[in-house]
Image: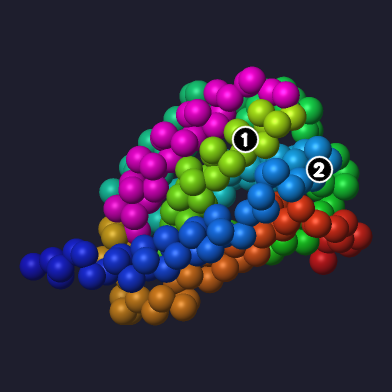
Amino acid sequence: MAPPQRSLTAPIKQHVERAIEELMASLPDPHGLSSDEQRGIIARYAAVLEGNFIYWMTAAHLAVASGEARAIIEDNLREEVRDNHPGMLRRFVIAARALPTDTDALAVGRNLEHVRRFVGELDPVRIVVMMAFFEGFITRFMPYLADLAARRGSVEMEYTDVHGVVDVVHTEGLFRALQAEMLRAPAAPEPARELAGVEVLRTLLEIVVDSDALVVPQAA
Ligand SMILES: [Fe+2]
């Protein structure tokens, strides 16, 4: 007989929700940002998301073992590819005159590399937890990102409109995938271990939303 389902993912979900709340609470007040600082946040967000989201979700797909988790993640990937979400983000960024520059790429470079190395470990539970955090954050972040773009004169909001809605469903799906993977895990979950990906991604997102983000000259 299957063990009670709620208890497996509930403590991790609480940690993930708290991490999202803390990140949202740290966002600088858009009123106080210069136009360059507004541009920087949009550009660093694009530098992280456009080329990496599908790659990291693909890593989650490669890592998971249960048929249920694989199917949930595959649906997510299919939607990303079929609806051309990277293209949607690019249109959003161009309309906001916030295409990433070399400076933006370097500002996130070192922490982006840390996430890539973490993802490369292909640990099923830890990657799914990280992606649930990512989707949950993206959903919450969309109104703020749209506001920054509007302040820069843009009216192109398809990306933020779509992601404020679909990622709610995706986040819930990823917690179901997590449940399926945790039921297969031989050992009892240890929240500190399972949250390692949340911490490494959170550090990267803190640089994205840091209006004082500085260039880090070497990607080490
Ligand atoms: Fe997307």
Of 178 and 202, nearer the camera is 202
Q: Looking at numbered disc 1 in the image, what kind of residue is underneath it?
A: Asp
Q: Quadrant of residue 3?
A: bottom left
Q: What is the C-alpha distance between the residues marked 2 and 1?
A: 13 Å
Q: Is residue 164 magenta?
A: yes
216 vs 135, left or right, is: right
Mark 2 or mark 1: name the one nearer the start of the chain.
2
Residue found 45% across the figure and 65% down from its top: 18
Q: Which quadrant holds residue 206? A: bottom right
Q: Is residue 163 above or below residue 125?
A: above
Residue 12, percent from left and from top: 37, 68
Magenta region, residue range: 153-178
Query: Horizontal placement of 212 versus 65: left or right?
Result: right
Within 8 Å: ligand 1 and the Cβ of disc 1?
A: no
Q: Which residue is mark 2?
A: 34
Percent position (x, y) of residue 98?
Answer: 77, 33
Q: Is residue 157 magenta?
A: yes
Colouring convention used in this rendered image of the protein: rainbow
Q: Nearer the viewer, residue 24 or 32?
A: 32
Tell me the SS state at disc 1.
Answer: helix
Tag 2: residue type?
A: Ser
Q: Residue at x 47, y 76 (%)?
A: 193
Task: Find disc 1 in the rendering and name its residue.
Answer: 147
Q: Position of residue 188 (x, y in %)?
A: 31, 79
